[in-house]
Image (cartoon, helix red, strand yellow):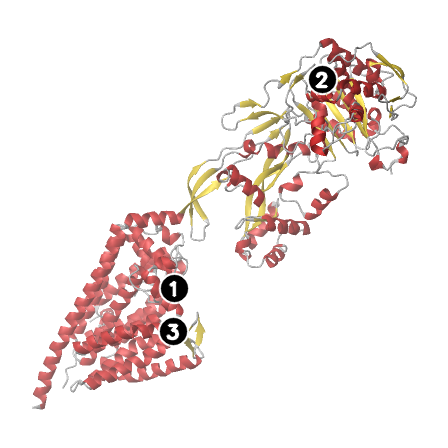
Amino acid sequence: MTSSARLWHYLTRYVDNFLLAGLLLLMLVGLLVLYSATDANLSRVSNQLINMLVALAIMWLVANIPLQHIMRLAVPLYMIGLMLLIGVALFGEIQNGARRWLNIGVTRIQPSELMKLAVPLMMAWYFDKHEITLRLRDYAVATLLLILPLLLILRQPDLGTTLLIASSGFYVLFLAGLSWRIIAGLLVVSLGSLPVLWVMLHDYQRRRIMTLFDPTQDPLGAGYHTIQSTIAIGSGGVIGKGWQQGTQTHLDFLPEKSTDFIFAVFSEEFGLVGNTALLLLYMVVIGRGMMITANASTQFTRLVAGSITLTFFTYIFVNIGMVVGILPVVGVPLPLISYGGTSMVTMLLGFGILMSIETHPKLVKT
Amino acid sequence: MRRSVELRNHGRELHHFQRRLAVSVGFVILLFCLLFARFFYLQVSQRDHYHALAETNRISISPVVPNRGLIFDRHGEVLAHNYSAYTLEIIPSKVANLEATINELASVVEVSGRDRKRFKKLLGESRQFESLPIRTRLSDIEVARFAANRYRFPGVEIKARLFRQYPKGEGASHVVGYISRINTQDLKQLETDGDFANYRGSDYIGKIGIEQSYEKELHGITGTEEVETDAAGRAVRVMSRNPPISGNNLKLSLDAKLQEVAEQAFGERRGALVAIDPTSGDVLAFVSKPGFDPNLFVDGIDSENWDLLNNSIDKPLNNRALRGLYPPGSTFKPFMALAGLELKKRTPQYAISDAGFFSLPGSGHRYRDWKEGGHGRVDLHKSLVISCDTYYYGLANDLGIDKIFSFISQFGLGKLTGIDIDGEVSGLLPSQEWKMKRHQQKWYAGDTISVGIGQGYNLTTPLQLAFATAILASNGTAFRPHLVKQVTSSKTGEVRNIVTGPLYTLNFNPDNVAHVHKALVDVTQPGGTAARAGAGASYSFAGKTGTSQVIGMKQGEKYVESKVNERHRDHALFIAYAPAEKARIALAVLVENGGHGGSAAAPIARLVIDYFLLGKLPAGAASETGDDGEGVHD
């Protein structure tokens, strides 16, 4: 082997090429849309490019870590995360009316972001440990592991993150074989608890939900986002207005157009054709994730891979759902396309784990 | 054993897991289909609806203000025009702290105390969301300085705007008037007139004078622009344009040079002069002194200047020619004389023996002539030349109030002349009916006597007096007096005359009129009351002096000019026309508290007519026309 071939082998040994190709394509779309959404602001586009490169590097690093190590990290990560969340609740900094950040001297961190991975890892670890003798009690414990951080995050308040972590935890429970009867029971209970939850919600959260049903109720306030984004999408028609030609986007009618509402920019400029292509591209990535999940050899890796893949889907569905006006406006970015480093890193960290699961020698339980 | 259980368990677990995974995939596909259905609904079924919404979002129709029509004098000299300049404007609704913003602006461009006061005044009168000028006429350097600091001032903008300017300043200010910012009262008026739409985007409207009365001609038709706007409402680019139609240009009948000569002839004195072309009704000069600078009003006048103008004892904002009411005094006599001849109460030969007073039969009350002891034998000719009061006391008594009223009415006294600027007052030509209505009193024979010499209840405006003089000068043909001669359509270039024919013609006996003309020409000849003003005129100069009392004199009291407060002195009047045989100009002059008509008012008429007929400019300043040496101003 020549040295360059060896380097190439070293670099790509633990990378899943199929998944990487899908991710890179999505990122490319993301950069193109961002270029349009920021009115050709190259500094923001290059910022995002750096975010992507950093996230890709992290993904590569994680992909190179054998699963046993990752599994060993599950408990400490969860514990640290939980402690940090308590720290946020006690000493957190308030920004935009929410207490989400913790100042740890050198930098500020958002522990809830860490929990997006730590919670499913922890739950999968727990199920793995009790694999042989799974009983109802084990599901109850796993659920407790999920609910503890959720309550802390809901208090911050951060509805979007709560929702995502809740779903990632739920996926672990579901894939671990939680019986349908209990799922149905949970569904009934959660529907029944809606009124209670309603009382607990903050005013702005209630308003967001109310305006989901009738955005025109508050056209200049909470409904403005949804009204303008549906106008953008609808006016895009079948083939769209063309790249950088969206009037809603470039005349500033769209709010948050480079972050949470970036899908409206894409949709206005590329139309139904673009939307369908984007959904298919996401579908490819999800499909590959499902395949990795199906091939995973241990309970831990299966649950982690399945949860990561389905959570990725949840991001997509919740974000697009809110932009097209069928879900309430919650702060969930469109994965790999919305501007922002944190979600990019979290997302690719997850895909790094997927790659590690796929590419490292499969462990067969002995 | 244990191993096999585990393996079996493992296999069952795996199978179980695969089923769950399959359900998940189904779940994902189902929700993606839901999203696709929503895309289809928005982008295919409802596409047109949302397309329309996006278009109305981005396109707004904005008005394009037309250029205001220009105003020229009869020879094409500019009296009102527009120029483009930069203004610094604040949109108050977008500025949190106006005071602080203005203070900060003052560090970039000069903002004087006057600017601040004016801004405050505008703020009180302005429409909502309007942008208001804090500074006008910025220099190029100031524009550049602000542009560099622009980011510091959200809600403050530089705008290029058209400004109205009146190059003559005070000259003809009462005729041209001015425009000023539209206030709430104007808005209400526009709404009732149904002109509101045409004033979208307009900031200015004519307030007085021709600017007001010809507002409809001058304003023009507002155009529209389809503008693409962003979410903040800022215009991004123009999509299509329906250009505005400029206002029509006005050509006045006024002669700017003549106007200037007349204004200068007044010097510092207060008064009014109206000169009319008796063959057409063209108003050649229209003076009300003092005037004001209309330019002060255009950007919104500051309170200091406003107080100065509004509270001045000289009342410069009062249009004396149009609205000032004065007893016509002896200038009434020519019309009385013609009434006597036409109604056959007098012949030219008939003469009275004037002892200096008139008494009604059976009454001891003496109506005094201005000259103690009287003028001796006085016929109609002499009665006008020397302005004998006694002659007209008797004539008035012989005619009676009803005949005086109906005859003099024909000359337009006591009625609106219908001149083409607003605010004219009708004056008063008394009648029995009027007295009953106004004072609930019957008319006494004694009332008629003082009417005969233009005193008593009589009140006229200088404009009415000039109009009446013009009718007399044209032997009875009346044209509606008008300041605007022609309107030129900016769209078609078509020229329209304001007055095309006479209002009416009075069929007087030409001999009777000739007698009056002859006597009025002799007024300016040696022996006449205006002999000094008429000396050396190279044309036949007809005129009549008049004096009207400001304060009443008690029976037997004597009026001594030097003893009376300046503001209580008599007003000096003079009516004139020339050349008498075929008059081209007829005028009325009033000098407030000027004393005698012959000495104070007639010289002004002479200067104006000299310039008009001969093109002769007055020698030197107004000194020649000063008071005739008598009396002390205090």
Residue designated by label 1: A47
B108 or B243, nearer to the observer: B243
Alpha-carbon distance for marks 1 and 2?
A: 92 Å
Residue name at image x 20 percent, y 60 percent: B33
Near mark 3 (Cα within 10 A), the count class, few <14, some 14-19 or many ≥20, is some
Residue at (52, 28) in percent of width and height: B490
Is any atom of residue B512 visible in this view?
A: yes
Q: Which residue is mark 3?
A: A157
- Crowd band around label 1 with a 10 angstrom C-alpha radius: few (<14), some (14–19), many (20+): some
Tag 2 residue: B472
Secondary structure under badge 2? Answer: helix
Q: Nearer the viewer, mark 1 or mark 3?
A: 3
Q: Do discs 1 and 3 share a chain?
A: yes
Split into 4 quadrants, where in the image is the N terminus of chain A? bottom left
Q: Residues within 10 Å of mark 2 (few under 14, many from 20)?
A: many
Q: CA distance from mark 3 to mark 2?
A: 95 Å
Using the numbered discs, state the Cα–Cα distance from disc 1 to disc 3 in whole angstroms: 28 Å
Report x, y in % for residue B474: 69, 15
Mark 3 or mark 2, which is nearer to you? 2
| First in residue order: circle 1 vs circle 3 | 1
Q: Position of residue B175 (x, y in %)?
A: 66, 31
Q: Nearer the viewer, residue A34 or B81?
A: B81
Outermost residue on the front side: it is: B362
User: Which amino acid type corresponds to the residue marked 3 in the rendered image?
Assistant: Pro
Quick one: which residue is furthest to the right in this view?
A: B373
